[in-house]
Structures are given as C-alpha cells and as structure tokens.
Amino acid sequence: DSGVTQTPKHLITATGQRVTLRCSPRSGDLSVYWYQQSLDQGLQFLIQYYNGEERAKGNILERFSAQQFPDLHSELNLSSLELGDSALYFCASSFSGEYTDTQYFGPGTRLTVL
Amino acid sequence: AQSVTQLDSQVPVFEEAPVELRCNYSSSVSVYLFWYVQYPNQGLQLLLKYLSGSTLVKGINGFEAEFNKSQTSFHLRKPSVHISDTAEYFCAVTSYSSASKIIFGSGTRLSIRP
C-alpha cells in the first residue's frame, strides 16, 4: 500500500459525458501527478501540481483539467468523453515535487467510455 | 527531446534464472533514470533510480541497474528471479531541463516459468 488513494476504482460512462477522478496523496506529500495508461499510448504524464499550483504539464488534452485543493487532494476532470479516453488513470504523489523525487502511485481508476 | 526505448515487450524466463531487461534512452542533456514495476492490478512502484554517482544502482527485491552513458543504456538485472517477480517493468527518464516531466518506456512484461 503506497498511501495514495484514488476513487472511484472503476467508472463506466458514455461518450460526451463528464467525470471527475479523485486522488488523496500520501500524508506529508505536497505534489500530485496524474498519468494515463492505455494500450495504444502506454503510460503518459498528464499534469503535476505542487502545493495547489500547477507545476508541469504533459500530454493533457484541452478537454481535461485538474486542480489541487488546500487540503492537497486533487481532482482530474475529463469532459466531452470519447471512446479513446478509456484508460487507467493513475495519481502519484511525492514530497517536494522535484524531478528526482520518488513518486508513490495509487491503485488507479479504470475509466471505460461506451 | 528525450525518449526511452525498452527493447523487449515480453521476456519469459525460468524461475531462479538470471534476467536482464533492456532500456535505452536518448537525450541531449544529463538525465536521471528510473525503473518502476507494476504488479497485476496495481499501481507502479519504484525499483531504483540513478541520479548521479556510482553507475551501478541497487534497488529493492534484489534488482540492480547499470547506467552506461556511452551506450545510453540503463539495463535492469536480477541474478535469480522468483515467481513473485512476474510483473510489467517500466524504464523512465527525466532531466533538469524537463522540469519534472517524466517519460516512460513502453514496458517489458516479465513472465516467470516454474
């Protein structure tokens, strides 16, 4: 158990809908990262927050957005969903958010878009 | 731009045999390298990382990796594998210039035969 929690574990929805994925970092960690893992794209970094502020952006679509709240939990919002958005979404956390940090991954949320 | 190539998508080995999972990277700047493991239905877990110093890095569960700058490689090795090592292994790279963005390889599925 990494100490990172993600809810829900599974999510099934329809094209065009909007969903919110939630992540709680390990106690004491200030930085949260979001990743997408799919069969065709592999594991891709989406976005990073540190202490409430966006720190780095990867291959995140404009239909996707995220935020980190004062209690340090984070939410990833996916809108206008397409079939290709079906994937495993991981959240990770680290203490300082530096590039050399060890990231601790949650168990993931499996999103299925029908 | 940086990239990571994991040369083998699947590696089958017998229990107690040695294994090497290959990883090559490309970058025009100094890099920091990681190996993560993903057990079935779980998130990723850090095995080891190379930041600087000794090119031979020891990690958890008996794994080690060697950073070879001239060959731009960071191969993962274990002298004797166990059934419990069955998992997917990801090599990843980041650098100071990438501002904490991390790029993952496509993964190598290690399957252990009794």
Image (cartoon, coloured by chain):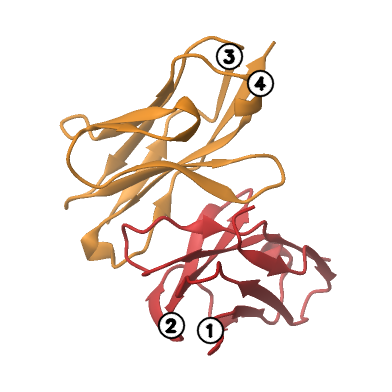
Chain colours: A red, B orange
> In the image, what residue type sits under mark 3?
Val
Q: Quadrant of residue A31?
A: bottom left
Chain bearing tag 1 is A
Q: Residue at x 40, y 54 (%)?
A: B103
Label located before the other in sequence (3 or 4): 3
Q: Amino acid type of disc 1?
A: Gln
Instruction: Return the x and y of residue B78 as percentages of the image width and height.
Output: 45, 21
Q: CA distance from mark 1 to mark 4?
A: 39 Å
Q: CA distance from mark 3 to mark 1?
A: 43 Å
Instruction: Answer with left or right where residue B112 lies relative to residue A42.
Output: right
| B107, B57: nearer the viewer | B57
Marker disc for residue A51: 2
Q: Which residue is mark 4?
A: B83
Circle 3 residue: B13
- Amino acid on which the number 2 mark rests in the picture: Asn
The amino acid pointed to by label 4 is Ile
Whether the residues at callouts 1 and 2 have beta carbons within 8 Å, the answer is yes
- The chain holding disc 3 is B
Kindly state the secondary structure of the residue where label 4 is placed: helix
Label disc, if present, on residue A68 of the rendered structure: 1
**Left or right: where does residue B82 sit relative to residue B3?**
right
